[in-house]
Structure formats: C-alpha cells, structure tokens
Image (cartoon, rainbow, N blue to C red):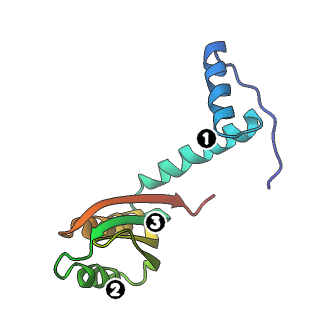
C-alpha cells in the first residue's frame, strides 16, 4: 500500500452518526477503511462513464436454454468478441433456466455493446453488468 496521509474532515454530527451505523453494518472496523473504499468506489464509477476507459466486467445472465437457437446465439456473440471474453461459467438453475457469468476485459464502450447484444437476445430473462476499473 502507498504511504498514508492524514487528513481532517468537517462533517455534521448527524451525518457522522449515520455513517458510523452504515460502516458498522458493512463490517468496517474504522472510518478510514470505510472512507477509502467509498472514495475508490466513486472513482471507479467515474471511470465507467468514459467510453474509452479500460475496465474489467462480469455479465450475469439468466436465460431459458430451451429457447430455440439461444445457446448457439449466445456462443456466437461471445466468439464474435473473443478478445474481450476471458471466460464464462454456466450453471443449471432448474430444468429450463441457466445462469451464465461472463468475465470480460476491454473498454467501457466495447463491454456495454457486448452486454446489450447478449441481454437483448430473445430468451434472456435477466442480465446484470458489473464493471470494475483496472486503475485500482
């Protein structure tokens, strides 16, 4: 870890009390750790807004595997962007539904485009894209 710098904050008592409750409920043992993580999170979210930012991501989808041609279509979409797709994990949820988690690396623009193409496929019931910055 880089060298730490001490700083002071002026914050309303009520807001600090609410923050302390949030911090404790999320398992933080001190304010410094909690604030560092919140700052990192805000900076990561700022990176997501830049289309050319290099990010890593997971796309989680639930789909009906009995939807005609859907498994083949999902595979084709991933192969079309094989440089961005690092790996995927397939899980059978029940007789008809599957969960697939796709790990990707690329620009925000590229990964959002891939996500949109996959989640728009007929038979995909739900999708969630989670982006992380490579700058952490």
User: Quadrant of the image for the N terminus?
Assistant: bottom right
User: Quadrant of the image for the C terminus?
Assistant: bottom right
Residue hosting label 1: 38
Residue 17 image label: none
Residue hosting label 2: 79
Determine the secondary structure under disc 1.
helix
From the viewer's perspective, is residue 102 above or below residue 129? Answer: below
Q: Dot 1: few (<14), some (14–19), or many (≥20) neighbours within 10 Å?
A: few
Determine the secondary structure under disc 2.
helix
Q: Are marks 3 and 1 in contact (CB under 8 Å)?
A: no
Q: Dot 2: few (<14), some (14–19), or many (≥20) neighbours within 10 Å?
A: few
How many discs appear?
A: 3
From the viewer's perspective, is residue 23 above or below residue 90? Answer: above
Quarter-of-image position of residue 83: bottom left
Could you tell which of marks 2 and 3 lies nearer the N-terminus? 3
Quarter-of-image position of residue 23: top right
* Residue at image location 46% in from the left, 72% down from the top: 104
Could you tell which of marks 3 and 1 lies nearer the N-terminus? 1
């Amino acid at each position: 870890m880089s060298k730490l710098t001490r700083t002071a904050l002026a914050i309303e008592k009520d807001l600090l009390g609410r923050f302390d409750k949030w911090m404790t409920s999320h398992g933080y043992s001190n304010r410094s750790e909690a604030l560092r993580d919140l700052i990192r999170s805000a900076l990561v979210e700022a990176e997501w807004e830049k289309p050319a930012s290099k990010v890593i991501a997971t796309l989680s989808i639930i789909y009906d595997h009995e939807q005609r041609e859907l498994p083949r279509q999902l595979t084709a979409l991933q192969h079309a962007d094989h440089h961005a797709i690092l790996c995927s994990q397939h899980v059978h949820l029940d007789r008809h539904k599957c969960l697939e988690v796709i790990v990707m690396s690329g620009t925000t623009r590229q990964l959002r485009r891939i996500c949109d193409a996959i989640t728009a496929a007929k038979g995909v019931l739900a999708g969630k894209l989670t982006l992380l910055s490579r700058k952490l």
